[in-house]
Image (cartoon, rainbow, N blue to C red):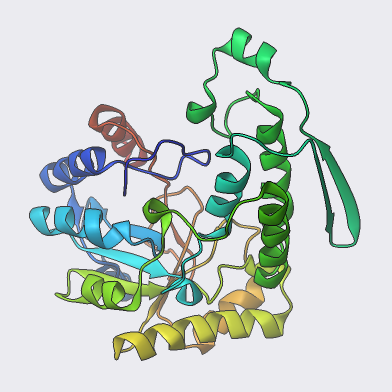
């Protein structure tokens, strides 16, 4: 919930647009909390036109930018927090990859990495994106991964490495990012705009009852790619660490990435065993009465203005 110069994954919503979204929801829909949705599902009757707002990962801007707006409109929300990133001075790996590859003025010509035993070599010499910029009028700062062309060679490398890093363990990701940082001559310390919550901010976000804190694993690993033992550790440690920080139970959960291939049947079993009552997934669907509380679908909201947002809302509600 911040205004960014670059947003290659289209994950950011500006405070101005978010305020417009909240105002529109408050006027036309029924905003409820995730806990209220769970109780409604148990009762077999979800109120008409209900909307639940959720955030993933645990960025500090959820406190400084999102919470004041949620309070202004009296709309509840759930923030799913990756526990090991609380108090960290490093960015989440997808943000760090962007910072290291896309924001440097001068990168070495060659990048060589070994990922899962396979050697990769990228050539970043020359301005390979000049023709793309002329043809598609792509500005590097406005580039995102939905575009068919890249304004420079580092953008193609970013695409490749995002795909390669996503299924890896947290330790493997950190090792590769440290290698890239050394190669790029850049520190690992993250940007203020992209930093995670610290403990005091997490407690402040939790204070007041309007925002619920949910678990999002310990390190934000892609659960389906990990052995069952690692999945169990990620889910339980993430939940228990947050409970220790907050001093109360955490009962909601969101699968990292959350697509259908990002978690499996065993993942759901572990989530249930951990005492979690609801788990959210990014299916891109809206809720129906028979929805499994451990596979609650969500829709992704981009940085749209209120006109585009309202159009999507009407589409999701078949209005």
Q: Given the current orientation, which residue lies at the most extreme top position?
A: 135
Is residue 261 or residue 157 the one in the foreground? 157
Q: Given the current orientation, which residue lies at the most extreme right position?
A: 118
204 in relation to 307, above or below:
below
Residue drawn at 9 percent across, 54 percent down: 72
Q: Which quadrant of the view contains residue 156?
A: top right
Is residue 261 or residue 197 the one in the foreground? 197
In this rendering, the count of numbered labels is: 0
Is residue 286 or residue 148 the one in the foreground? 148
Q: Which quadrant of the view contains residue 134?
A: top right
Q: Which quadrant of the view contains residue 110?
A: top right
Quadrant holding the C terminus: top left
Residue drawn at 18 percent across, 47 percent down: 29
Q: Does residue 275 appear in this view? A: no
**x then y, percent, for residue 188:** 57, 60
**x then y, percent, for residue 76:** 20, 63
Q: Does residue 55 appear in this view? A: yes
44 in relation to 48, above or below:
below
Residue drawn at 71 percent across, 66 percent down: 175
3 in relation to 248, above or below:
above
**x then y, percent, for residue 276:** 43, 82
Drawn side of residue 29 relative to residue 216, left or right = left
**x then y, percent, for residue 294:** 48, 71
Residue drawn at 61 percent across, 50 percent down: 97
């Amino acid at each position: 919930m911040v205004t960014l110069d670059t947003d290659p994954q289209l994950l950011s919503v500006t405070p101005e647009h978010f305020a417009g979204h909240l105002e529109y929801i408050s006027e036309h829909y029924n905003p409820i909390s995730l806990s209220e949705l769970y109780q409604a599902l148990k009762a077999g009757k979800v109120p008409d036109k209900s909307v639940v707002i959720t955030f993933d990962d645990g960025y500090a801007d959820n406190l400084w930018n999102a919470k004041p707006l949620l309070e202004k409109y009296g709309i509840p929300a759930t923030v799913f927090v990756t526990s090991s990133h609380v108090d960290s001075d490093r960015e989440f790996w997808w943000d760090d990859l962007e910072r290291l590859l896309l924001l440097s003025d001068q990168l070495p010509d060659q990048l060589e990495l070994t990922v899962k035993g396979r050697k990769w070599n990228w050539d970043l010499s020359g301005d390979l994106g000049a023709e793309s910029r002329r043809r598609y009028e792509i500005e590097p700062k406005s580039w995102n991964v939905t575009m068919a062309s890249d304004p420079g060679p580092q953008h193609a490398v970013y695409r490749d490495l995002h795909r390669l890093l996503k299924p890896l363990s947290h330790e493997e990701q950190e090792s590769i990012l440290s290698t890239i940082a050394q190669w790029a001559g850049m520190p690992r310390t993250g940007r203020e705009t992209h930093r995670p919550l610290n403990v005091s901010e997490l407690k402040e976000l939790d204070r007041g009852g309007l925002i619920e804190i949910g678990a999002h694993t310990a390190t934000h690993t892609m659960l389906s790619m990990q052995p069952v033992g690692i999945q169990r550790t990620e889910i339980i440690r993430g939940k228990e660490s947050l409970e220790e920080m907050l001093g109360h139970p955490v009962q909601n959960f969101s699968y990292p990435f959350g697509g259908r291939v990002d978690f499996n049947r065993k993942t759901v079993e572990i989530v249930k065993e951990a005492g979690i009552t609801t788990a959210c997934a990014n299916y891109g669907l809206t809720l129906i009465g028979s929805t499994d509380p451990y596979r609650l679908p969500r829709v992704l909201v981009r940085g749209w203005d209120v006109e585009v947002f309202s159009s999507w809302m009407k589409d999701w509600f078949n209005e």
